[in-house]
Image (spheres, helix red, strand yellow):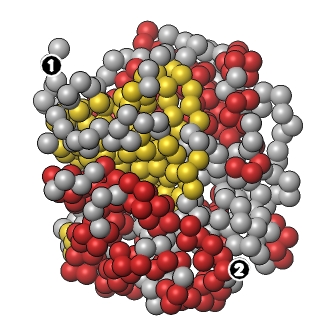
Amino acid sequence: MGFDFLSGRRPSTYAGQAMIATSHPLATSAGLEVLQSGGNAVDAAIAAVAVQSVVDPLMTGIGGDCFALYAPAGGQVRALNGSGRAPEAATVAALRAAGLQDDIPPNSPHAITVPGAVSAWCKLHGEYGSQPLEQLFSRAVGYAENGYPVTPRVAQDWEGAKDLVAGDVHAAKVFLPDGRPPVTGERHAQPLLAARLREIAKSGAKGFYTGETASHMVAHLRSLGGLHTEVDFAAGCDEAEWVTPIHANYRGYDIHECPPNGQGLAALVILRILEGFDMASLSEADRIHLHAEATKLAYHHRDALIGDASVCAGLAEELLSDAVIETLRARIDMTQAQPPALWDEPEHKDTIYLCVVDAHGNALSFINSIFNGFGSGRLDPATGVLFHSRGSSFRLIEGHPNAIGPRKRPMHTIIPGMVTQNGRVVMPFGVMGGHYQAAGHAAFLSGVIDRGMGVQEAIDQPRSFAFGGMLDLEKTIPPQTRTELEARGHTVRVLDAPIGGAQAIRIGDGLLEGGSDSRKDGMALGF
């Protein structure tokens, strides 16, 4: 049966040589322009993320973190960890002495780790880029300096996050012009951000992590009560590091994820649990129930066990072993929602994604985030840098794997994905949406692999997410299905807003099939 062009959805995008998919049209067009000029996948991704750091300031920026999976043509998948570390002086005792008890609020200076994104961009570009940063940043600099039109989804999110930036006089000045968020079609500019991008283009990571810019950022963070030093920032200059991806096989496909401190391991655990069921034959209620139960089990382990890589040695191999997966799978009752439990361990008490495939066959899965909408809501007035809130993921529990500590990385929700088969890259993909991302990876891949869906069709499927004791459903899920889920013991909450977003590019023989989530403003384009 052909595509239903009256569905209100859109079909996948097809091209023969190169493609980029992002969640913002200006980012996609900037990346496509680079590809058309002879740039490679890394060049296009950096141009696109730089633009999105300007035009989607709630979701990403140079004050955030980054992860990437890169598959050079004919080579192995590589993982880049561009997440920042806590200051050297950060300890559970120090934060408790500062008055924090159970959690680190998003707007606290202690939620701000040294941003890792710029270090990751520069490392990736230094090894694989082919065009100068000045050229790649040109669109972003122009939008920051001269303004850009605010798109509908960005405007909606801006309105929803206005209270956070209203609490910081410097952030409010930039992001609440005239005392309110911009509406769709209004122009917005960030001239100081243009200056930062020019510095990075000229001096690389040193232009951000050392010198006058770093000095201003540190002074501002310390004025808020932060523990950051210029030494901490200087160490961040070359903090991004190549690490070995983790992977699991799902019905003949190898799914690659970044290792801890990311939550990609949770996505693989969900998939391995689902592999024991005939997903294609299940009803919608059965699929949602099974996905919820597998998600609860995987996230329970995530929250108890995942933290900085230094405390996670061997964890992926253990959790993905047949013995553990079979134990977890056996706990699922298809008729009744169950509380999650660890397999046999002691109990412990907002984002943009893009992917690119270039004409040479290089594939990049790339994610950049400031976590909450507008991150910490804290903006340095001297540099215009809006800081992320990733440190709010740390726990204030001594001995916990994710307890804050000197130069530790927190558990991260942002995870790029890559699919290979028999050593050949099949699809870079990713899902945005904070904690939803690991669950989203599993749901999307099951749609493509188990149910034979096209890329855009799988992205557009109604979403559900079991988290925090609730089963959240998008309102496109029928009332009858909701009733069935409630009868199985789920506490159902129907959301007005969509859950997350996604992009993917599937690679065939001489054909690229791309999708970009209609829940966002973006698109997939190629040639």
| Residue 408 appears anywhere in the view | yes
Q: Residue at x 34, y 58 (%)?
A: 129
Q: Is residue 373 above or below residue 10?
A: below
Label 1 – label 2 distance at C-alpha: 59 Å
Please state, as top left, top right, bottom left or bottom right, where the N terminus lies in the image.
top left
Q: Residue at x 65, y 24 (%)?
A: 337
Q: Would you call the spot at circle 2 few (<14 residues within 10 Å), some (14-19), or many (20 or more)?
A: many
Residue 117 in the image, given as x and y percentages of width and height: 48, 64
Q: Is residue 524 left or right of residue 327?
A: left
Residue 516 in the image, given as x and y percentages of width and height: 28, 42
Query: Between tags 1 and 2, which lies in front?
Result: 2
Q: Residue at x 52, y 46 (%)?
A: 79
Which label is found at residue 227? Answer: 2
Which label is found at residue 87? Answer: none
Please state, as top left, top right, bottom left or bottom right, where the C terminus lies in the image.
top left
Q: Is residue 207 left or right of residue 23?
A: right
Closer to us: 7 or 410: 410
Q: Which residue is mark 1?
A: 2
Q: Is residue 295 above or below residue 171?
A: above
Closer to us: 325 or 332: 325
The kind of secondary structure element at disc 1 is: loop
Q: Residue at x 50, y 66 (%)?
A: 119
The kind of secondary structure element at disc 2 is: loop
User: In the image, what residue type sits under mark 1?
Assistant: Gly
